Image (cartoon, rainbow, N blue to C red):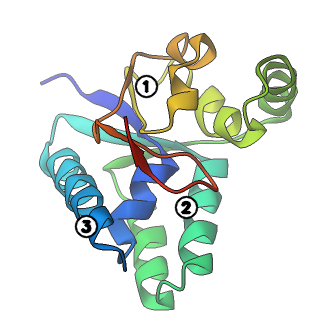
């Protein structure tokens, strides 16, 4: 059975662990968790992350007040066969800087995705920045949380 490598953007990871206080975001959390459960239980799919994204996810969870035990367990999970980690190299930074300046999209989004070019066959993101052609050059982009749009530093909205 061929293995499919996918990128799951940080905004989806956040809602897997996030305990929403607002009722309208419970649906978002449930969709995120079900999506990730499907990915994690499918033996034909591996999750690819850049080493930068690993740090981004862990920092996001730390700032959100997630328990140290959960964070340590996730770090251990990243070492397992289900995950493939691509190291961020200086050339990734140079390309990310150039593309970020041209598109006005966070450099962080590029640092998540660029190291995975040639590895992933699909990108899953609810961030509408990922609909930019720069990211579609890496792999097709799907929003598994549609109609939700998630963007760093903003309240989630339905499109």
Task: Tell me if residue 88 comes above or below residue 54 in the rendering.
Answer: above
Q: Is mark 3 on a helix, strand or loop?
A: helix
Comparing labels 2 and 3, the label whose residue is closer to the camera: 3
Residue 15: image quadrant is: bottom left
**Disc 2 crowd, CA 10 A, few/some/many (<14, 14-19, 20+):** some
Q: Distance between the residues labelled 2 and 3?
A: 20 Å
Mark 1 or mark 3: which comes first in sequence?
Answer: 3
**Disc 3 crowd, CA 10 A, few/some/many (<14, 14-19, 20+):** some
76 relative to 117 in the view: left or right = left
Comparing labels 2 and 1, the label whose residue is closer to the camera: 2
Mark 2 or mark 3: which comes first in sequence?
Answer: 3
Q: How far apart are marks 1 and 3 (CA)?
A: 29 Å
**Disc 1 crowd, CA 10 A, few/some/many (<14, 14-19, 20+):** many
- Quadrant the N terminus occupies: top left
Q: Position of residue 125 (x, y in %)?
A: 43, 37
- Quadrant the C terminus occupies: top left
For label 3, the residue is 26
Q: Distance between the residues labelled 2 and 1?
A: 18 Å
Residue drawn 73% across the image and 30% down it: 105
Q: Can residue 79 be seen in this view?
A: no
Mark 2 or mark 1: which comes first in sequence?
Answer: 2
Comparing labels 1 and 3, the label whose residue is closer to the camera: 3
Q: What element carries label 1?
A: loop
Residue drawn 48% across the image and 78% down it: 71
For label 2, the residue is 57
Residue drawn 37% across the image and 71% down it: 17
Q: Position of residue 110 (x, y in %)?
A: 68, 32
Tell me the tag on residue 120. Answer: 1
Q: Position of residue 135 (x, y in %)?
A: 56, 20
Q: What element carries label 2?
A: helix
1 relative to 75 in the view: left or right = left
């Amino acid at each position: 059975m061929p293995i499919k490598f996918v990128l799951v953007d940080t905004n989806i990871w956040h809602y897997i662990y996030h305990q929403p206080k607002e009722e309208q975001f419970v649906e978002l959390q449930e969709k995120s968790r079900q999506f990730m459960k499907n990915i994690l239980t499918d033996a034909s799919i591996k999750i690819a992350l850049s080493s930068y994204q690993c740090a981004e996810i862990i920092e996001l969870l730390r700032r959100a007040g997630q328990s140290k035990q959960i964070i340590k367990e996730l770090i251990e999970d990243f070492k397992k066969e289900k995950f493939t980690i691509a190291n961020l190299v200086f050339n990734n930074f140079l390309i990310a800087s150039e593309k970020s300046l041209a598109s006005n999209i966070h450099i962080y989004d590029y640092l998540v995705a660029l190291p995975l070019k040639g590895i992933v066959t699909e990108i899953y993101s609810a961030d509408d920045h990922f609909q930019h052609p720069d990211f579609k050059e890496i792999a097709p982009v799907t929003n598994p949380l549609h109609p939700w749009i998630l963007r760093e530093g903003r309240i989630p909205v339905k499109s």
